[in-house]
Amino acid sequence: MYNGNKMLKSAHGFTLVELLVVMAVMAIVGVFTLANYKSFGEDQNFKNAALDVQSFLRLAQSNSTSGLKCQSQDTLGWIVVFTNATELDLECQNSSGITSSLKKLSLPADISISGITTGISNCPFGTTVTFAPLYGTMVSSCGSSSIIITLLNSKTSNTKQVIVEQGGRIYAQ
């Protein structure tokens, strides 16, 4: 309000400077939130890929321990083949020795297997992990008591490991 030459102090509201400061703070918070959200999404996709590999290995193990038959015949083993850097293959071998491919797992874009090791030596692609019937213990074509599969996210350069121990324990870290 204006009363002659004096402005009365009863007028309430925000000044233009105050509004601009609030808008600037909100914009800064929004930019950081968006950047962190994209990073969070990448991390979740990578974590899910590692869990997918772990689940694929556990599927072979559980098929083996449950005595699931391969093409209506007794099964000699359930096998996971690390075909290449982005693909795994689930196979079963029946009592006649015939191996059949049953399911494939393809890793998402930007995520790949950077290495398969025994902790001592590197294993080539084509390495197999076989789970024996009944007990679900692991036998690797690399000839080791355990195998370490290292996944790489090419966008962030982060790595995760999926470890399969001879006794059957499978975990990601």
Image (spheres, grey):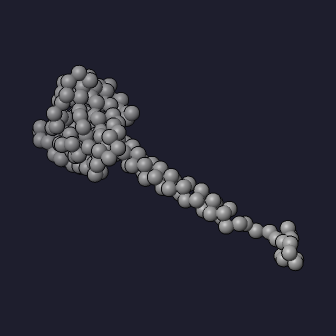
The residue that appears at 28% across and 34% down in the rendered structure is: 149
Q: Is residue 24 toward the left or the right of residue 164 in the image?
A: right
* Residue closer to the observer: 35 or 92: 35
Front residue (pair 76, 24): 24
Q: Is residue 54 above or below residue 132?
A: below
Front-lying residue, 11 or 67: 11
Front-most of residues 87 and 31: 31
Question: Percent x, y for residue 114?
Answer: 24, 37
Position of residue 75 in the picture relative to residue 5 (left or right): left
For the image, the number of numbered tags is 0
Find residue 53 and report its horizontal and vertical position in percent. Answer: 31, 42
Give the residue drawn at x 56%, y 54%.
Answer: 29
Residue 106 seen from this side: yes
Q: Position of residue 168 (x, y in %)?
A: 33, 29
Residue at point 35%, 36% (across, down): 160
Residue found 71% across the figure and 66% down from its top? 15
Residue 19 in the image, given as x and y percentages of width and height: 66, 64
Q: Quadrant of residue 85?
A: top left
On the question of residue 132 being in view, the answer is no
Most extreme residue toward the front, as rendered? 5
Quadrant (top left, top right, bottom left, bottom right) of the C terminus: top left
Task: Pick the quarter of the image with the N terminus.
Answer: bottom right
Q: Is residue 169 above or below residue 1?
A: above
Judge left or right: residue 45 versus residue 12: left
Q: Is residue 93 left or right of residue 52?
A: left
